[in-house]
Amino acid sequence: MSETTKQDEKQVWVTESLHDHYAQRLRVDEMLYDSETEHQRLKVFQNGTFGRILTLDDVVQTTEGDNFIYHEMLTHVPILAHGSAKRVLIIGGGDGGMAREALRHRTVEHVTMVEIDAGVVDFSKEYLPMLSQGAFDDPRLNLVINDGALFMKETTEKFDVIIVDSTDPIGPGEVLFTDTFYGHAARALTEDGIIVTQNGVPFMQGDELTGTLRAFQALFADASCYLATIPTYAGGPMAFGWGSHSSTNRSVSLTDLEARFAAAGFETNYYTPEVHKAAFALPGYVQKLFP
Ligand code: SAM
């Protein structure tokens, strides 16, 4: 048990409240914003290791330091696997990081982002501009403030790629992990469309992944998941759900991916065509979560 020094007592820490028996602590070097929005308690604070951090209801959403891993893997994997994605839908993603990466694809003509909480967008623009990097001003972006489940139920639009960048299945995010929501999403995808989902850390949140995979197996020609480790999503690698009406998108060759990535013409800090392919190689404990 570490000794608490006087200096420690002056320090402020945020303890994440996501798991019952396991928690991470993040030191607050400066609290930049802390208040309730219409839907959630929003905090933005400076941390010596990860830079600026956004939490909602004391759960880490994104950080300046490690967001690139999450945002690159949830955008470039489906968009490059598809090969000719023009219309992308983001559900959630209020910090703007997902739109940032999706809009790097010049071939993407239209991105609709449906975020339930205008406060997350406003405070991310103000305190986390390095996340969106101007994405909110891109003429291809259509920002909709609405419940993603309602939008999905009512939309008549079709999308090549749907990215669910939501909070965990607690509070406003719960409805985004339901069979009803996934059914509406399947209807809104083009015939070779792909949906990918933030699906938690399987070592800690296995049931969440199993539930999504069960729904995807019933709705799509191809259902699986892929992994990447994001340091501030504590508990091991994070899983991204994968559902596609096409049975060939996931087996795209490394050579084709390399050609598509080269043609896209931008640099990344995590994503590579090799990492893309390897991310679908699943360890035994994750394979055992498939229904
Ligand atoms: N990467 C984060 C994670 O893995 O937990 C998610 C980041 S992103 C900020 C999550 C966003 O989902 C939040 O801005 C939240 O307001 C939004 N959200 C939650 N429930 C929603 C819903 N039903 N419809 C649309 N957006 C929702």
Image (cartoon, rainbow, N blue to C red):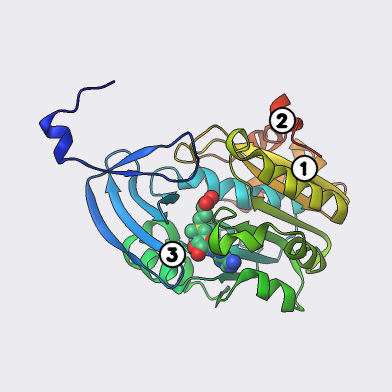
In the rendered image, is residue 146 in sight? yes
Checking the image for residue 282, the label placed there is 2
Given residues 272 and 194, the one toward you in this image is 194
Q: Is residue 10 above or below residue 31?
A: above
Q: Is residue 261 above or below residue 114?
A: above
Checking the image for residue 32, the label placed there is none
**Looking at the picture, how far across and down is residue 66, in whole percent?**
44, 42
Checking the image for residue 40, the label placed there is 3
Label whose residue precedes the other's in the sequence (3 or 2): 3
Given residues 230 and 133, the one toward you in this image is 230
Dot 2: element:
loop
**Looking at the picture, how far across and down is residue 214, in whole percent?**
80, 47
Instruction: Name the residue located 67 percent from the left edge and 35 percent from the top edge.
Output: 279
**Looking at the picture, how far across and down is residue 1, in whole percent?**
29, 20
Answer few, some or many: residues within 10 Å of disc 3's Cα (few below 14, many 20 plus, some between 14 and 19).
Answer: some
For residue 92, what is the image quadrant?
Answer: bottom right
Q: Residue furthest top?
A: 1
**What distance separates the C-alpha of mark 1 from that of mark 2?**
10 Å
In the rendered image, is residue 97 in sight? no
**Looking at the picture, how far across and down is residue 26, in whole percent?**
33, 41
Q: Amino acid at mark 3?
A: Gln
Dot 1: element:
strand
Residue 148 shown left or right of residue 192 in the figure: left
Label whose residue precedes the other's in the sequence (1 or 3): 3
Instruction: Name the residue located 75 percent from the left edge and 37 percent from the top edge.
Output: 255
Residue 76 shown left or right of residue 26 in the figure: right
Answer few, some or many: residues within 10 Å of disc 2's Cα (few below 14, many 20 plus, some between 14 and 19).
Answer: some
Instruction: State the residue position of label 1.
Output: 224
Nearer the camera: disc 3 or disc 2: 3
Q: Residue furthest left?
A: 6
Answer few, some or many: residues within 10 Å of disc 1's Cα (few below 14, many 20 plus, some between 14 and 19).
Answer: many
Q: Verify CB contact (< 8 Å) between mark 1 and mark 2.
A: yes
